[in-house]
Amino acid sequence: MAHITLVLPYALPLPEFAPDLVRALDAPSLAALLSRGAVVRPAAASPLPSALPHEAWLARTLGLSADGRPAFANAAMRGLGLDPDGSAWHLVTPGHIQVARSHLMMADPRQLRLNDDDSLALFDSARLLCEELGHALVYGDAETWFLRADGWSFDIASPDTVVGMDLTDFMPKHVDARPFRRLQNEVQMAWHGHPANAAREARRLPAVNAFWVWGAGGEQTPKHAMSTYAAPGWLAALGERKLASLDKLAGALTNDGLLVAANLAEAAIAADWSAWLQGMQQLESALFAPLLAAVKDGRVRELRLVLSSREGLLESSTTPMAQRKFWRRPTLDALKAA
């Protein structure tokens, strides 16, 4: 019998939206999984965290942390078939920074729809600038690059943490960060008017006008095997199996394992709650219902759910014995708890 952990980033509604969203959500299988078992809600994150709750949870669980912060870069490099060569590396996420009324703000990187052709063209111009400063830049995939971290061990928050926030609060400000900030400015100037960006704008896509450096890591390797669905490149690289569609999810859960289904992220970040509800309904039919059946008939000995929002985390576990507690009425109230 399998022991399964399912991580669902952004499946936990923010408190101000939770009552209406839970009322609109038709998910009886999820309700049974949450109601007939144990639910734990850890303490809320700090006001300016370096990672979102599910990212911090994954870092702890996979053993990929340094000084209490996520350190995914080196493990992601190996997952993409690259050799860290005994050095520490940063993750590099190409991005689009826009000017709000009083501050700079980064858009959700998922909205870039960045393909390999555009990414490689921009990468090549940035690589030369990085090498001039003695920091190698390596290509992983269209949305995942790596910058050698020698001397640049910055504690910079993850891209999803800073999306929509004032970037000034998250930029490194100490004296040692000056060369890095200068590099950022030089890359921005090189990308301004770059043919790849001109072509993107002609296709009505956002220009790639900045990059975000984060997640510096050492030589740790993930402690657990992991499958992913709809995950950003860096996260998919940490897993052994990348699932292409929802109909593959249940098949990934026949043995012990950890699955991260990240299909709700873009809708939640954009506050597109109609799309979020559609995503949850897909998970209900493709994942929650088959999992509930597997728990009830004993094929899954223990199912652990890890649901998160930008602000919090909910952990739930259930077993075949717990699902026999018929007197516990299935409810989604756990999603509304403050």
Image (cartoon, grey):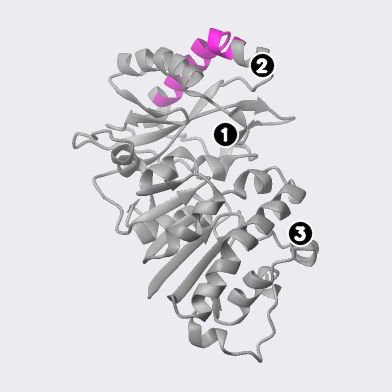
What's the residue at 38%, 55% (across, down)? 226
Disc 1 residue crowd, few under 14, some 14–19, many 20+, Cα 10 Å = many
| On-image quarter of the C terminus | bottom right
Residue 110, image x, y percentages: 58, 35
Q: Amino acid at mark 1?
A: Pro
Identify the residue at the far left of this view.
Answer: 86
Which one is earlier in the sequence, the residue at label 2 or at label 3? Answer: 3
Residue 135, image x, y percentages: 30, 23
Q: Amino acid at mark 2?
A: Arg
Q: Nearer the viewer, residue 129 or 18?
A: 18
Between the C-alphas of marks 1 and 2, the distance is: 17 Å
Q: Which residues are magenta?
A: 180-198
Which one is earlier in the sequence, the residue at label 1 or at label 3? Answer: 3
Query: Does residue 184 belong to the magenta stretch?
Result: yes
What's the residue at 61%, 36% (across, down)? 108
In this orientation, does residue 43 appear? no
Q: Which residue is label 3 attached to?
A: 17
Above or below: residue 207 compared with residue 229: above
Q: Amino acid at mark 3?
A: Phe
Q: Which mark is residue 203?
A: 2
Residue 64, image x, y percentages: 33, 52
| On-image quarter of the N terminus | bottom left
Q: Which residue is label 1 attached to?
A: 109
Q: In which image quadrant can residue 280 be found?
A: bottom right
Residue 75, image x, y percentages: 31, 44
Q: Nearer the viewer, residue 49 or 294?
A: 294
Q: Which mark is residue 77?
A: none
Q: Nearer the viewer, residue 92 or 150?
A: 92
